[in-house]
Image (spheres, helix red, strand yellow):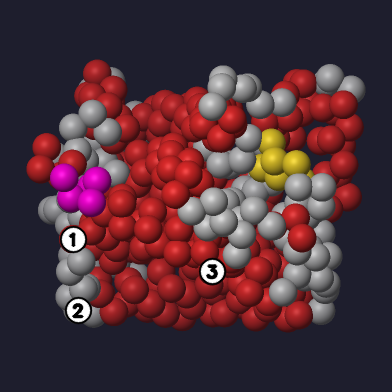
Amino acid sequence: MNKRIDSLDFLRGISLILVVFFHTSVYNYANIHKIDFNNPPIIVVLISFLVLWGGLLIFYSGIVNAIMFSGRIEKLGNLKHANFLFVAGGIYIIIHYILNIFLGRWNVDFVNNQPDMTVVANSIRNMKLIFPTIAKFFEGSSVSTIGLNLIIVASLLLLLLKNKGFEKEKRNYWVLGTSGFIIMLFSFTRIYIYGILEQSIQAKNYLLATILSFTIANPYPLFPYLAYGLFASVIGIMIYKKRKNLIKKVIIPIGLFFFIYGLVGCMNFPKTISKADYFWYFKTHLELGFFILIITIFLLIFEFGNKKIINLPFIKWFSRVSLTVYLFETLLSEIFGKILNYLMPTWNQTINGCLIFGALNIIIWILILWAWKKNDFKFSVEYWWVKIFRKFGKKSTKMDFPQTYIKLH
């Protein structure tokens, strides 16, 4: 039995390329504050959808871990795998703070054009060491949501699959799927409690602010993104059980439901970006539906259908060291942007100029990864990840090249 699923690793590589491209484009646009974000142009709305491909990374993590969890329970009767997922979840939360405070993207008050930058972005742009405001400690991220999904979903899987619960397949699908539906459909409640986050920061109630930063803060709050992990677990178990028909008859209709529900909702509310409102609520449904559909289509064609996926080595490189690229894409883009400021001071005055800048960042990353792969990506985050988990007695697959995890046809 090999170790990975080609089509899912391909999608992860593509999603990371898109994340880097749109991050480096959007967050370097000098005139972003001049856009009317209460009624933004359609191109801006489209970009806001594409920026949030981190949701697919959350989904990918849920699928892979459900497969691994199922395999260990069925073949080894080993529930200790849950311990590794808890440890991994804790590491992701630590990385979340490293990203939000030091290495990551910067948030911005679009209306007043007041960016709240991380240490790296602020220091490079101003050429002196500058720390962010306290509010940076209470922003969300896809990394923290992946970590919390690992902990929460692993706990639920542990309850469901132990004591021969693995054999109660229908029950497990119902519990995971119903929980996902409830979280998604009622995630509109975030709209009415979001203000508590800002109030808690102003009142210096940092414990409450920390809890809310994980659950309702932009851009990847646990509600609704916990549902992504729950639906991903359903798909992961179906993959492991080789339930091609269930994926066709159950998962695809679910994906269509969320896609249509989200699309209709988005069309009936004012288009906004990064606000806790009904447009954002429906947008997360639309994205969930899209991710479910694209993942199931890829699985049915390339895994169950035994078709060969296109072989583009650089996509595999991005997938293999995805966390490393995600952590350091800001550092690269800020250095590159600083150099361009001296050579072409007006490069970031137009959206087109910034899109070209995003494309150049991808090219630079491809060159870096091409050179780095010759050393097998030694000293990457994934390299150290493998080292850490070996200390815990678990062989990690993070540094393996994408291969089919289990024959589905």
Q: Tell me, yes or no, whether the highlighted magenta stretch contains residue 273.
A: no
Kindly identify the amino acid type of the residue bearing the numbered disc 2: Lys
Describe residue 400's horizontal placement relative to residue 344 as left or right: left
Magenta residues (range)? 367-371
Which residue sits at x=38%, y=53%?
361
> Mark 3 = which residue?
352
Q: Main SS of the magenta segment?
A: helix
The CA span between labels 2 and 3 is: 37 Å
Q: In this view, does 344 lie to the left or right of 309?
A: right
Q: In which quarter of the image is residue 311?
A: bottom left
Q: Which residue lies furthest to the left in this view?
A: 374
**Quadrant location of residue 305?**
bottom left
User: Mark 2 highlights which residue?
Assistant: 307
Choose mark 2 or mark 3, whichever is in front.
3
The tag on residue 313 is: 1
Question: Quick one: 167 or 299, which is closer to the camera?
Answer: 299
Cα gap from disc 1 to disc 3, whole angstroms: 28 Å
Residue 378 spot, x, y in % from top left: 18, 32
Per the model, the C-alpha gap separating discs 1 and 2 is 18 Å
Using the image as rendered, state which of residue 79 and residue 293 is in the foreground.
293
Res 383 → quadrant: top left
Q: Which residue is drawn at 62% across and 48% down?
A: 220
Q: Position of residue 88 (x, y in %)?
A: 41, 31
Q: Reading the chain from its start, which is encountered first: label 1 or label 3? A: 1
Identify the residue shown where x is 80% and y is 65%. Answer: 36
